Amino acid sequence: MSLTKAIVGFLETEIINPAAKFVEKIAFEMPSVTDLADTYKGTWYLSPRQHTIEFVCYNILFFVLFRVGLHLFRKKGSAFYSPRLDQLSESINTNVLSAHVMDKAVLALLCGSYALTVYHKIFGDNFMYLLQPCHVNLLLLIFTMVGPRESKMTRLAFNSYLHYIWATIFALSFPDTSENGLWLVIENFWLEHYLLLLVPIYLIYTGRFAVFPLSFSYAVLSYALFSLFHSFLLSGIGLLTGHNLNYMLVPPNSPLVHGLGKYYRLIMYSSMFVLTLISRYIIVEFLSLGLKFKQWNKANQLMREQGIPRVKKE
């Protein structure tokens, strides 16, 4: 027991405390008093010590999850290496620039909405908030639509996004429609988030992308990437700039989240994993029901044309 105390005491005095002082020194000069009504500004809601410990622990955890998910997903025989998936992907043109006029119109809406967002953030003096997940997801959709046909990255990016639809649904359910006096701010908020919700459905039903079969390993991989984006990039930049990027420094103005106290990020990360599974295993599957019914009818029609009788269960 004394040895354990000695090790803990050594880590505390020689590593954790100096690291916490270093974080406090390089961090933006944030106040200690938190105004929960103003969630744009960062404060020391969490102490430098807690930020230091969580930054190290969360990033190690999510990186390990990423490596494990990637290993299992790339394992021979997994969904990603399914011959059927390769055959589907070969017949799909993922480069929208040479595609149907409707695809070009959708791409123009995505680019127009993002251009308006850039305008609003730069001239609203909060350009750091271009790193908010919804704006990054909009860029991800644009990338998937203009990416090269032969690249697996576009397929991977699109199927990763299908695990993040919950974030768009949350944003639409609890909208932040604060006005900053700039042109079309509120209108673009709704346009952006409805595009984030409807464009993936459009891309699925038009056959632009092959949707990966359900894969727990890819869900873990997608969750780890999304979490690393928060725990490493948003948390790190938030400390350096004082911006509360996606609530990495201060919790949202909600009585439920306030009740979680200093460990609200632990609950948020845990909830994100559950919501990632719900997005892919329930929401996307539900949205794809019409497509699966269409494919089933097409397969039955083909069998009838070939004179193959339908197999009936006894």
Image (cartoon, grey):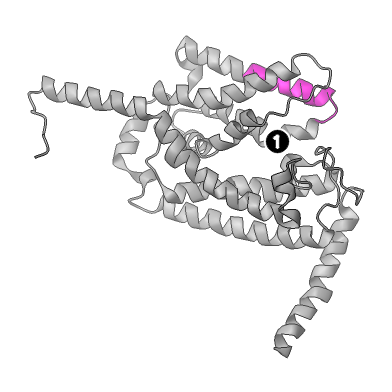
Q: Quadrant for the N terminus, please.
A: bottom right
Residue 206, compared with residue 9, is above or below; it is above
| Range of magenta residues | 111-126
Above or below 123: residue 18: below
The answer to whether residue 114 is magenta is yes
* Image: 186 above or below 66: above
User: Which quarter of the figure is the C terminus placed in?
Assistant: top left
Mark 1, Cα crowd under 10 Å, few <14 / some 14-19 / many 20+, is some
Residue 89 lies, in percent from the top left, at 37, 32
Please give the name of the residue rendered at 69% of the width and 18% of the height, measured from the top-left corner: 188
Direction from residue 89 to residue 71 in the image, left or right: right
What amino acid is at disc 1?
Gln
Q: Which residue is pictured at 69% across the width and 52% down the height? A: 265
Kindly report the secondary structure that dominates the magenta region of the rendered protein: helix
Specify the quadrant of the image occupied by residue 303: top left
Residue 25 appears left or right of 198: right
The quarter holding residue 118 reads: top right
Residue 111 in picture, x, y percent from top left: 63, 19
Which residue is nearer to you in this view: 79 or 164? 164
Residue 314 within the segment the image draws in magenta: no
SS class, disc 1 = loop
* Looking at the image, residue 119 lies above or below residue 57: above
Residue identified by numbered label 1: 132
Along the line of sight, the residue nearer the viewer: 146 or 304: 304
